[in-house]
């Protein structure tokens, strides 16, 4: 071909196409870090194999194949000796790598940078603060209908366990589960004039501690170079394609317009009017009175802090420390007390009505007594109806939009499959059967890692132990699925290569190992475990998991600058905490309990294994709905906000970890809602 | 408060003792004057036996009904349920309606069962109808899975037939040797390929009128070994029995979760995989079973005013999501196998005490048995006969029985269509 033809076929000027490695990851230092991390993992895997004298892969002799085939459904009963195998890496090793990440173009002399960012992540990336999250998640506002807000009569938190660090739950009040901040979602029933609310808002600790924070800091030179939000231009990439990772929350997804006609159906305005008998019409917008009283309280602090540090006045933290810290601290308490008002209030009013008496039981439908409950019931039944319609039309984009307000338990499985375009057709079944045959024919070293991981995690888990065998059936097949390799087109990671014996470093003898290119780490099986609650056929379960992995989960253990990448999530978590809970962040940092060192393990698993399953599924609804993992970082920050009071009292990393050890009683949606929409900014 | 409650127990379990101590009650010995005695079933037999002639005062309370065994002994429970069904049939109650195969539509909730040796001939007749069935043999008076075995050939129970022929009288009188034989549920619902049963707690404060409460925090007990209906595994009890007492000795027993799964997990799983309606219907049916079993024994129960009882209901769900009542325990285990188990059982006792000893004060056996809602804790009212009768206008029993406790939205799709009347 002569080159003028090439010239002609090209579109005129325009920017040159980005080289493929840039679509994987535009920042070179990220690529380098990922590459050396991969090298490290592979080395660890290889040295373990050498040490144990086991080949990476071997064909199973026929009798062994037959045996495995026979007990395919009960692999958990097989107890191979795994004592010599160890996970290739654990989240904590990965965190170390992330903490050591640096942008070579950025001057990071410690003194100064500690002023601008207190966290562990030292790379400049653009991550969303609360206003951006609000903008990105309009469906999560306090006034819109939401599944996962009301305490569900049938799904109480799995364990009645109150963590040691939370003394604020009186044992005698069974109506308010410890982790449940009942945020009124679409609830007009908190009377705006109720006297109980202001006292909880004006929590005493507010003004007392905050002035100290700035004082502890050397009033060094204002540090100009990392204002949060400045996108950093990477050294080697003059042509960051527009629309690359730096854009927070890919909100501009095409499905929005498609589904918007349906939104009015779920609009929160409907319930209040229908349930009006219970609810005096004057009770509207509870959040306004909630936040208002703060303003006068915080303003006096400005003179207190400003004199000491005139120089830092321009730095981004200042306005944040002045106004915001107390808001998240006190917010979680509001809901703890407020539901009790209507409790007594409405119970009396309704005890006379005794509507629809039932034979088996009369008193138990106490839930029906509340206007709020009625409204949320109404939202729920309407939402279920809408969900059926979405399913009926098999509209993937609509299902995704729908999932933002949560999927009803009974419809979640088909809705997620629809969103993920995961089918269960004969081809899918055949594909799964082929993978299964692959497992039976060949023994891979990574199988042992999977066994080990399942035994260490899911098998000991109160929620997931039941599904041990399903996990093997999914994960062993996954490791042999070469269609997973496609995701390396947009994953910053590169599939690891091994060489046929004796042909080391000769590319023509290189094979990708394991065949799917993913080396499992400690906790990997927890990505699958919650899905076992939704799908009871291994094939279906497999399809949905694979899709979840290649869309989301891979980002949680690859180094990249993508907004859903683990680096961005860590940074976003730290920024949220530093901006909105500076006192807390400062306190924890002082006692050597960096928040990220606690929250990292949650985020790396997208909270699987930490929350109760019903709550986890509600969280993952939103991951799918917003097509983003950012909600994970937001929740991590919200958890700290919720436990802030207890955390302020701890004096060591161990006790901070103890306060945050049990998340199984938390209700995620109220937590996220309060943190995002009730925090003052 | 008029003085401290003096308590005794012959079951030294921390979940009990901690609850008593938390209330500031005083421990005394059996021979002293006591107010509250949490006793084993052996002790209750002595307390109410004719010989000892113990007379309880108004300020004394015990945790068993004198003849609880009418419900909690496998053979007597079956006998009472059979009698209850016949009585309803005689009255022409619509509850006793049968389908075209002669099976009760609403009262078929225990597997087909016979007493051995007493009903040996009846059993043989039934066995021959479908000889491929597997049957389960259980000694009447034993618990925790002791003495249980499976059979699928008549020859395996020859012993009981001989007894039957020689001396029916003797075998019937020596109750300990008596067995019940039940059709084995060989199509249990499997989760993750494993068999499980449900342990749910029910508190009864009075039988006439019947007032009972269901505890929301029950659990599923899983077998550690994959379930196989194959008859070659009939001897492997780890496959078939879910009792922790049995499973604990299996190699795969896990001491962190103890093979236990909360009922809320079960509900979440079933709603997610099978849908909300069928799940609600299942739980409605479970509640229905409990109420019916209690109503079946209510007429024969000695409704002593000093008594209350917390029962452990064992229920198996089959793969068509039909629940089966297996047995009822009078002394559900208070041993804690895991940390969560301990919390659950501590709370169970706590909530039970809150109901039966209002305000932790010295009990008065003439109490009204109408605890305030705040005192219920994790209990929900299962059935309150008094209240049900006072609502005479609503006579549609069956549509109501199809309703769940606090279930939402499923009311219109009632399970049992024909109207019925309370008697």
Image: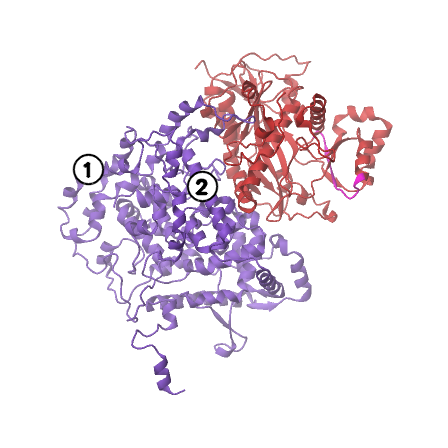
Chain colours: A purple, B red
Q: Position of residue A475 (x, y in %)?
A: 54, 58
Q: Which residue is mark 2?
A: A382
- In front here: B77 or B260? B77
Q: Quadrant of residue B54?
A: top right
Mark 2 nearby-residue class (10 Å; few <14, some 14–19, many ≥20) = some
Name the chain letter of the residue that bears numbered label 2: A
Q: Nearer the viewer, residue B295 or A571?
A: B295
The lab-note entry on whether marks 2 and 1 share a chain reads yes
Q: Visible in this render: residue A185?
A: no
- Contact, mark 2 vs mark 1 (Cβ under 8 Å): no
Given the current orientation, which residue lies at the most extreme right position? B166
Left or right, A331 with reference to B241: left
Q: Earlier in the sequence, mark 2 or mark 1?
A: 1
Q: Is residue B239 visible?
A: yes
Q: Position of residue A517 (x, y in %)?
A: 49, 66
Q: Residues within 10 Å of mark 1 (few under 14, many from 20)?
A: few
Secondary structure found at label 2? helix
The x, y position of residue B380, in whole percent, is: 51, 28
What chain is tagged by disc 1?
A
Question: What quarter of the picture does the N terminus of chain A occupy?
Answer: bottom left
| Mark 1, secondary structure of its residue | helix
Q: Residue drawn 16% across and 43% down?
A: A302
- Between label 2 and label 1, give the one nearer the viewer: 2
Q: Which residue sits at x=81%, y=33%? A: B160
**Label 1, on which residue?**
A296
Extreme-bottom residue of the structure? A2
Percent position (x, y) of residue A126?
Answer: 29, 58
Distance of label 2 from label 1 (alpha carbons)? 41 Å
Q: Is residue B133 magenta?
A: yes
Magenta residues, as a range? B129-141
Q: Which mark is residue A425?
A: none
Magenta stretch contains residue B93: no
């Amino acid at each position: 071909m002569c080159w003028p033809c090439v010239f002609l076929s090209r579109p005129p000027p325009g920017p040159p196409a980005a080289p493929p490695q840039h679509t994987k990851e535009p920042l070179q230092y990220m690529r380098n870090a990922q590459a050396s991390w991969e090298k490290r993992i592979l080395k660890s895997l290889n040295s373990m194999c050498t040490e144990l004298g086991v080949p990476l892969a071997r064909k199973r002799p026929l009798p062994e194949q037959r045996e495995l085939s026979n007990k395919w459904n009960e692999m958990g009963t097989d107890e191979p000796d795994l004592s010599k195998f160890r996970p290739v890496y654990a989240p904590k090793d990965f965190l170390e790598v992330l903490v050591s990440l640096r942008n070579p173009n950025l001057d990071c002399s410690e003194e100064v940078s500690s002023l601008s960012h207190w966290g562990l992540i030292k790379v400049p990336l653009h991550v969303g603060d609360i206003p951006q999250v609000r903008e990105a998640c309009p469906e999560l506002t306090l006034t819109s209908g939401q599944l996962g807000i009301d305490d569900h009569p049938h799904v109480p938190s799995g364990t009645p366990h109150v963590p040691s660090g939370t003394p604020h739950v009186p044992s005698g009040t069974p109506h308010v589960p410890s982790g449940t901040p009942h945020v009124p979602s679409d609830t007009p029933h908190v009377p705006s004039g109720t006297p109980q609310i202001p006292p909880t808002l004006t929590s005493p600790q507010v003004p007392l501690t905050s002035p100290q924070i700035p004082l502890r800091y050397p009033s060094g030179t204002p540090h100009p170079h990392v204002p949060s939000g400045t996108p950093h231009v990477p050294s080697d990439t003059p042509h960051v394609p527009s629309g690359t990772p730096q854009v927070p929350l890919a909100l501009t997804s095409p499905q929005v317009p498609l589904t918007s006609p349906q939104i009015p159906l779920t609009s929160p305005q409907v319930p209040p009017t229908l349930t009006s008998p219970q609810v005096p019409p004057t009770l509207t917008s509870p959040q306004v009175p909630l936040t208002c009283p703060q303003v006068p309280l915080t303003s006096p602090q400005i003179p207190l802090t400003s004199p000491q540090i005139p120089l830092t006045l321009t730095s981004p933290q200042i306005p944040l420390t002045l106004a915001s810290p107390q808001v998240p601290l006190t917010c979680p308490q509001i809901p703890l007390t407020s539901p009790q008002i209507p409790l007594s209030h409405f119970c009396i009013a309704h005890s006379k009505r005794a509507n629809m008496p039932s034979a088996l039981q009369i008193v138990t439908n106490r839930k029906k007594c509340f206007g709020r409950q009625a409204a949320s019931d109404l939202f729920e039944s309407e939402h279920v109806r809408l969900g059926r319609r979405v399913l009926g039309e098999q509209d993937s984009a609509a299902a995704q939009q729908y999932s933002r307000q949560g999927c009803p338990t009974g419809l979640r499985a088909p809705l997620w499959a629809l969103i993920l375009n995961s089918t269960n057709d004969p081809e899918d079944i055949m594909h799964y059967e082929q993978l299964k045959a692959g497992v039976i024919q060949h023994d891979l070293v990574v199988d042992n890692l999977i066994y080990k991981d399942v035994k260490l995690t899911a098998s000991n888990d109160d929620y997931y132990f039941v599904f041990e065998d399903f996990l093997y059936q999914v994960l062993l097949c996954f490791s042999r699925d070469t269609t997973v390799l496609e995701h390396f087109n947009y994953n910053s990671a590169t599939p690891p290569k091994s060489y046929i014996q004796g042909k080391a470093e000769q590319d023509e003898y290189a094979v990708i190992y394991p065949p799917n290119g993913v080396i499992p780490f400690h906790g990997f099986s927890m990505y699958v475990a919650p899905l076992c609650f939704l799908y009871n056929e291994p094939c279906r379960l497999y399809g949905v998991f694979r899709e979840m992995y290649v869309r989301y989960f891979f980002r949680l253990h690859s180094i990249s600058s993508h907004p859903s990448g683990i680096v961005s999530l860590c940074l976003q978590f730290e920024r949220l905490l530093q901006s909105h809970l500076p006192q807390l962040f400062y306190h924890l940092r002082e006692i050597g309990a960096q928040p990220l060192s606690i929250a990292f393990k949650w985020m790396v698993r997208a909270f699987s294994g930490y929350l109760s399953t019903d709550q986890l599924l509600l969280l993952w609804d939103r991951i799918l709905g917003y097509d983003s993992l950012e909600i994970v970082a937001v929740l991590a920050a919200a958890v700290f906000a919720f436990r802030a009071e207890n955390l302020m009292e701890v004096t060591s990393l161990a006790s901070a970890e103890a306060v945050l050890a049990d998340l199984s009683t938390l209700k995620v949606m109220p937590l996220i809602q309060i943190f995002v929409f009730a925090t003052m900014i | 408060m008029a003085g401290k409650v003096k308590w005794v127990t012959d079951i030294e379990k921390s979940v009990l003792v901690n609850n008593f101590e938390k209330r500031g009650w005083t421990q005394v010995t059996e021979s002293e004057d006591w107010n509250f005695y949490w006793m084993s079933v052996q002790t209750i037999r002595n307390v109410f036996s004719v010989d000892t002639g113990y007379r309880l005062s108004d300020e004394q309370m015990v945790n068993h009904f004198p003849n609880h065994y009418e419900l909690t002994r496998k053979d007597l429970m079956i006998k009472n349920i059979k009698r209850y069904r016949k009585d309803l049939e005689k009255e022409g109650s619509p509850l006793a309606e049968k389908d075209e195969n002669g099976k009760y539509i609403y009262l078929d909730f225990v597997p087909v069962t016979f007493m051995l040796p007493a009903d040996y001939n009846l059993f043989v007749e039934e066995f021959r109808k479908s000889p491929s069935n597997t049957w389960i043999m259980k000694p009447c008076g034993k618990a925790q899975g002791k003495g249980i075995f499976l059979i699928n050939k008549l020859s395996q129970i020859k012993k009981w037939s001989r007894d039957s022929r020689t001396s029916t009288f003797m075998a019937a009188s020596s109750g300990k040797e008596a067995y019940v034989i039940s059709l084995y549920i060989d199509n249990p619902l499997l989760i993750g390929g494993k068999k499980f049963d449900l342990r749910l707690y029910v508190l009864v404060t009075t039988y006439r009128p019947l007032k009972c409460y269901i505890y929301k925090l029950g659990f599923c007990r899983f077998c550690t070994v994959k379930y196989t209906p194959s008859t070659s595994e009939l001897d492997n009890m780890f496959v078939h029995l879910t009792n922790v007492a049995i499973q604990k000795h299996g190699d795969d027993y896990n001491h962190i979760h103890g093979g236990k799964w909360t009922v809320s997990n079960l509900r979440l799983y079933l709603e997610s995989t099978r849908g909300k309606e069928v799940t609600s219907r299942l739980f409605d049916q479970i509640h229905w079973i409990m109420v019916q079993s209690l109503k079946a024994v209510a007429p024969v129960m000695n409704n002593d005013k000093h008594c209350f009882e917390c029962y452990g209901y064992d229920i198996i769900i089959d793969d068509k999501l039909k629940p089966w009542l297996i047995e009822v325990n009078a002394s559900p285990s208070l041993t804690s196998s895991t940390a969560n188990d301990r919390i659950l059982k501590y709370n169970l006792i706590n909530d039970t005490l809150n109901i039966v000893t209002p305000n932790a004060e010295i009990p008065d056996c003439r109490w009204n048995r109408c605890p305030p809602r705040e005192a219920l804790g994790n209990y929900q009212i299962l059935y309150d006969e008094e209240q049900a009768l006072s609502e005479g206008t609503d006579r549609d029993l069956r549509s109501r029985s199809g309703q769940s406790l606090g279930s939402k939205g499923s009311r219109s799709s009632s399970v049992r269509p024909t109207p019925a009347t309370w008697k």
